[in-house]
Amino acid sequence: MKSQDETLEEWCRSLLQAYELEDVQVDINAILSLAGVAAHSVVRPAAPLTTFIAGYAAGLAAGSGSSAEAGSMDKALAVARALASDYDAEAAGTPGE
């Protein structure tokens, strides 16, 4: 039986291949860490939303040439992590789970 890490790596490769992005490097642990911060600092459903928007922002930055691929992903993850870490769900009127 495959480990969770092996399954995630295989799934990541499958997705990248499906989108013809085989040469893109994905830091699975950084993305999962960001999802965890968003889930615990905002609300649980913020995890997939945050990672999607960070990835989209990174893609736009890389596509426009304003940042290299790796740099755009690092920057997008850092911005999302800082925002989620600073977010106070209770102050916003949305108590955490």
Image (spheres, rainbow, N blue to C red):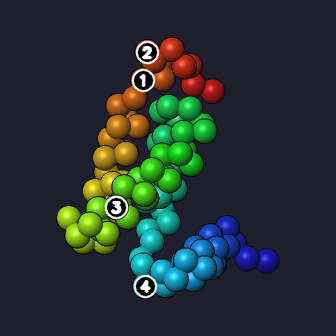
Crowdedness of circle 1 by 10 Å Cα count: few (<14), some, many (20+)? some
Q: CA distance from mark 2 to mark 4?
A: 42 Å
Q: Nearer the viewer, residue 23 or 81?
A: 23
Q: CA distance from mark 3 to mark 2?
A: 31 Å
Q: Secondary structure at mark 2?
A: loop
Image position of 61 with respect to 36: above or below: below
Q: Which mark is residue 23?
A: 4
Q: Which mark is residue 60?
A: 3
Please, what is the three-letter code of the amino acid marked with disc 3? Leu
Please, what is the three-letter code of the amino acid marked with disc 4? Asp
| Direction from residue 49 to residue 11 in the image, left or right | right
**Residue sticking out furthest to the right:** 1
Position in image of residue 77 (x %, y %): 36, 54
Residue 86, can we see it? yes
Crowdedness of circle 3 by 10 Å Cα count: few (<14), some, many (20+)? some
Quadrant housing the N terminus: bottom right
Task: List the residue tagged with mark 1.
Answer: 88
Q: Secondary structure at mark 1?
A: loop
Closer mark to the observer between disc 3 and disc 1: 3
Closer mark to the observer between disc 4 and disc 3: 3
Task: List the residue tagged with mark 2.
Answer: 91
Position in image of residue 92 (x %, y %): 45, 18
